[in-house]
Amino acid sequence: MRRGIRSLTGAGTVLALAATLTVGALDGGAATVASQAREYLVFYADGAHDRAIDAIDASGGTALSTETRLGYIVAGGPGSRFVEDLADSDAVVGVSSDRRIGSATALPVTGAPALPATGAPAALPPSDALGQRGTPDGRASATGASEPLAGQQWDMKMIGATADGSHATAPGSKQVLVGVIDTGIDGRHPDIAPNFNYALSRNFVTDRPKDPAGKTVDGPCEFKNCKDPVDWDDDGHGTHVAGTIASPVNGRGVAGVAPAVSLVNLRAGQDSGLFFLKPSIEALTYAADAGIDVVNMSFYVDPWLFNCKANPADSKAEQLEQRGVVTGMQRALDYARKRGVTLISAIGNGSTDLGRPSKDDTSPDYPKDVERTRKIDNSCLNVPAESKGVISVSAVGPSKRKAYYSDYGIEQADLSAPGGDEFDGGTGYDITKGILAPAPENALRAKGQLNADGTPKYKSIIRECRDDVCAYYQYLVGTSMAAPHATGVAAILISRFGKPDKSGLTMAPGEVQRLLYATATEKACPSSRKYAYKIDLVADEVHKCEGSKARNGFYGRGIVDAAGAASVTR
């Protein structure tokens, strides 16, 4: 199971066909490692900076630096005893170690070559090689649509982001800055480069080849000082997200929801797809100060599946750690939103009703092998999806049913959008029911997904060549893929209604949210509110949909609508 993504089918059931990724804990798992001095982010109460410094000193730690914008001190301290001592100070409201807090929320579908794709659209020509659809030289055939692969973008058709839809009347403005907080963006990809803003992009992480226990995390560093350039993505997740938002209309590959807006890489994720707290909040703070208009957050936090501020099942140190994650992310989110940044997040892939969590048996997942079963309730939060001021997006498949893996909840789901569902329609596994978007060639090669001659090994990958330049695209599924559709629609609205400012255009996040909700296509709960998902050789999974057509736990206020955003009046 990929860390940061809950069991796909709940109740301990696992889909055998879903590819998995196991990553070692970043700071090692042995008790001896845990006892060594580590760095912590110590969040202090309003007006309590000096008293927090005193508490750090009294607990045997050392204050290293202060971030006044978000109200935290970076401190070195001797392990869990240091944190427990800080818990006794009313000047300290949360403590989180400076390590991994989350993973990207896409479900890997590229590693399943033995599963045939079925039900491909009739417009597609036969594949000349596994993973290629097109002419024998690897060039994708035109489908009569604006872009060569537009015929495979069922997601864009669903929301009206097509050549004869929103692209024709409201493709977006270059003055709108869309931040992608993710694993990076391949800014050199032919279907990304025209819209990539290199000057504003930042990388907030340093690659970690191995953890202290010698286990591989990011693998060998490709660049000096293990610092990747701002136009690089070794994972592919962030590039897929970026392309869904704003691949340009340029006569090749695909087009995004808002194909004329600017993409800004705000890299906070490791090559391995893992996220740490400090880079994540630094990315949000930078977004606010740089004039970014909307950010996409397709990740969520570990080591706790649910962050509980005062769960009696947790120790004082554990409670304070979870408060640190909740507090730190909320302060960063508040800082960004107050400065005009609209915040959009994937809701998560745990097949879970987030309004009724009762048990967490996978936390903490760091250090390794310390998981335990603990009772939880609705006060325990999935961050940032359940953080205040964040628009959370659930995923739907081609038939518009909520995807089997998507989390849901009457209080948590704000909107829904295409995220893909390989089993939608009841005809078996079909990879083309995922979301197609750009993929970095370097990441595909590193994962062994391309042959030596560059042809794809799997049906989930497409190579499209023109003028002796080839570009790659891949199908992925997940709420990670749903959120960028909503982000693209938000970018359309800001392009239309934003007011000029020093960074380009700006629009109050509350007004962006209002129009996103107003233009969404309402979708009612299934006729049987207890909906049973039937997936090959797996026991039925039942999800209960609550609420009205105007707002319910599966679809929130409805499925985002780019065409509606292109035509709505204020």
Image (spheres, rainbow, N blue to C red):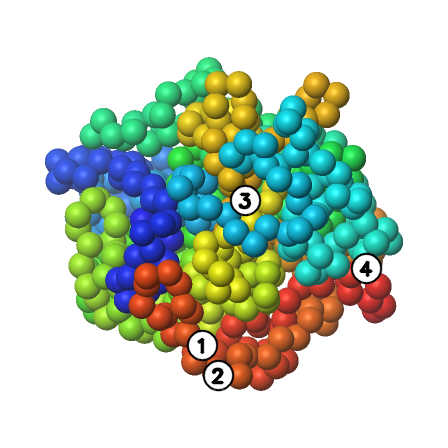
Which circle marks residue 528 in the picture?
2
Q: Are marks 1 and 2 in contact (CB under 8 Å)?
A: yes
Q: Nearer the viewer, residue 320 or 470?
A: 470
Which residue corresponds to the image point at 47% horizontal and 31% vertical from the top-left? 457
Q: CA distance from mark 4 to mark 3?
A: 27 Å
Taking 543 as reference, is 14 left or right?
A: left
Q: Which residue is mark 3?
A: 475
Q: Which residue is mark 1?
A: 531
Q: Is residue 415 left or right of residue 514?
A: left
Find numbered disc 4 in the image and state the secondary structure of the residue it sits on.
Answer: helix
Check the image and name the residue furthest to the top: 224
Q: Amino acid at mark 2?
A: Ser
Tell me the distance, in whole angstroms, between the alpha carbons under discs 2 and 4.
34 Å
Mark 2 touches mark 3? (CB < 8 Å)? no
Question: Which amino acid lies under the numbered mark 1 shown in the image of this protein?
Answer: Tyr
Q: Counting residues from the N terminus, which is met first, the one under dot 4 or under dot 3?
A: 3
Mark 4, residue position: 566
Q: CA distance from mark 2 to mark 3?
A: 30 Å
SS for dot 1: strand
Numbered circles on residues, count:
4
Up the image or down, 363 lies above or below 57; here it is below
How many residues crowd around disc 2 within 10 Å: few (fewer than 14), some, or many (20 or more)?
few
Q: Which is more foreground, mark 2 or mark 4?
A: 2
Label 1 to label 3, Cα distance in Å?
Answer: 26 Å
State the residue at coordinates (29%, 73%): 358
Q: CA distance from mark 1 to mark 2?
A: 6 Å
Q: Position of residue 155 (x, y in %)?
A: 64, 55
Mark 4 burial class by Cα count in 10 Å: few <14, some 14-19, many 20+: many
- Residue 303: horizontal and vertical position, in percent? 31, 51
